[in-house]
Each structure stands twice: as C-alpha cells, then as structure tokens.
Image (cartoon, rainbow, N blue to C red):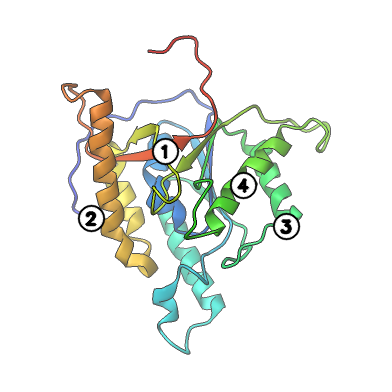
Amino acid sequence: MSTTQHTNAAVPSAPSGLSGLVVSAHSADFVWRAAGTIATHVAQGYRMKIVCLSFGERGESAKLWRKGAEMTEAKVKTARREEAQRAADILGAEIEFLDIGDYPMRVSDETLFRLVDIYRELQPSFVLSHSEKDPYNFDHPLAMHVTQEARVIAQAEGHKPGEKIIGAPAVLAFEPHQTEQCEWIPNTFVDITPVWEKKRAAIECMAGQEHLWDYYTRVALQRGVQAKRNIGITAARDIKYAEGLMRLTPVVAQHLS
C-alpha cells in the first residue's frame, strides 16, 4: 500500500441514481487513466461500471510471459482478471470482462450489442474510453470506436423496440500514454486529490506492469499542477493530483461561468 499523503478534502455528493461507464480496451487501462475519476464519482454516489474488452493477455503482459514455459494464455488471463477485479473493488466499481482478445483486437456484432445492452441497463450520464487515435496501440482507438457506435445504437428507437433508450451521455477520452502522437489534448480536469490513495492502491494491483506505477503517479502530479492553474493559483482549494480528459461531445449550457 502506498504511503503517499494527500489532503482530506471532501468529495461533493451528487444526486442519487446517476451512473458512469468506462470502456477499457485491456484490463489495466482503466486503472492508469481513469481510476481517480472512477473513485471520485463513486464517492459522490454514482454507480460506476467498467467494461474490459480484453485481458491484455498478449500485448500487455510481458512480465508474466517472461516466466517461461510454465506460462499459458489461460494463466495470464486469470492473473490479469484477478488484478483488475481487485482494483475495481478498491475503487468501489462494478466490472465486466468481455474477453474478446487483443493484439489484434476484433469486435463482433455480439460484443457491440452487449455494450448496447450495458448502456441501456446502466443509463450512464457519461462514458470514458480511449483516445480516438493511437499509433502505438490500435486496440485503444478501436475500443473508443465501439464505445461510440454502441452509444448511437443505444439511442435508436428501432433497436429492440420497447426498451428504454439512453439519452446523450457525454463522451470523454482519458489520457493515452503518448499524448502528442495521439492528438489528445486535455480540456477537462478531475481533481482526484481526495481519492489519490485509492488510485495508487489500484495501480499497485497491476503486478504485471510494475514499470508503470511511478510513471502514472508523475502524470497525476503533472495534471494536478495544470488543474490548479486552471482554477487560479491563488485559489484556496489545494489540488495535488488530477486526471486529464478530452471531452469529445459538446457542452450545452445556459451560462458560461
């Protein structure tokens, strides 16, 4: 468990009945990129659900495969599933594994329609997934593509007529590993200072990718500085850790303050 200290600022509550959806290409992606946002909304009373399209068993489990001949794909999947489940439990979120494979990832209609069903059952007010471009990992933009396609189908009256359709949940892309190459620019920051220890604990569940633990701690610190700057450096509110998001859908507002 991390001994990182943080301020104990209260997380504001939200109206009951709200929910959010996180679509993660691989079983660790949601931890690095959105664990703080997930924990923050759980603390506010949101029902948060994570969908992992794959376990990342081929492309993101090098440490496990280096154990040699004893390792099998089934064993890798089991280890990655256990890590992700522990992380979700720490964050207070639900998690579902669709196990569609990775490197390469391919999305069937069955998977697409399962995601549509999840949208309609959950009725999320927002959805998080990957950047729309990522030249280093083609599974990531594919995950965002199916996330958005399922959102559109879940809004269609003609898909399973009689079911409750969804509204228009906000779509936001969480931070990719190499932002510039992915054409990802943060335009939304979530202050995760009050829940930082939960995020760090979730990070430390990812034993197969220990090399990323400190990297994503530095990312959170960097985004914390930027978030503080965007509320004003003289503001009394202290922000040490934050997550950046790129909002892809417009904001409809009655005022701009």
Q: Give the CA distance from mark 2 to mark 1.
A: 25 Å
Q: Amino acid at mark 1?
A: Leu
Contact flag, marks 2 and 4 (Cβ < 8 Å) = no
Q: Residue at x 67, y 30 (%)?
A: 166
Image coordinates for residue 214, horizontal then vertical, percent = 26, 58
Q: Earlier in the sequence, mark 2 or mark 4?
A: 2
Q: Which mark is residue 2?
A: 2
Taking the spot 42% from the left edge, 74% from the top edge, the residue there is: 62
Label 2 neighbour load within 10 Å: few <14, some 14-19, many 20+: few
How far across and how far down the image is residue 168, in percent? 62, 28
Q: Amino acid at mark 4?
A: His
Q: Residues within 10 Å of mark 1 (few under 14, many from 20)?
A: many
Task: Point out the tag, 3 or 4, that comes first from the N-terminus.
Answer: 3
- Residue drawn where x is 61% and y is 44% of the image: 147
Query: Answer yes or no: do the residues labelled 1 and 3 have beta carbons within 8 Å?
Result: no
- Between the C-alphas of marks 1 and 3, the distance is 28 Å
Query: Which is nearer the N-term, disc 4 or disc 1?
Result: 4
Q: What is the C-alpha distance between the residues marked 4 and 1?
A: 17 Å
- Can you say which quadrant of the picture contains the N terminus? bottom left
Residue tagged 3: 108
Nearer the observer, disc 2 or disc 1?
1
The answer to which quarter of the image holds residue 43 is: top left
**Amino acid found under the numbered disc labelled 3:** Ser
The reply to whether discs 3 and 2 touch (Cβ–Cβ < 8 Å) is no
Q: Secondary structure at mark 4?
A: helix
Indicate whether 40 appears above or below 59: above
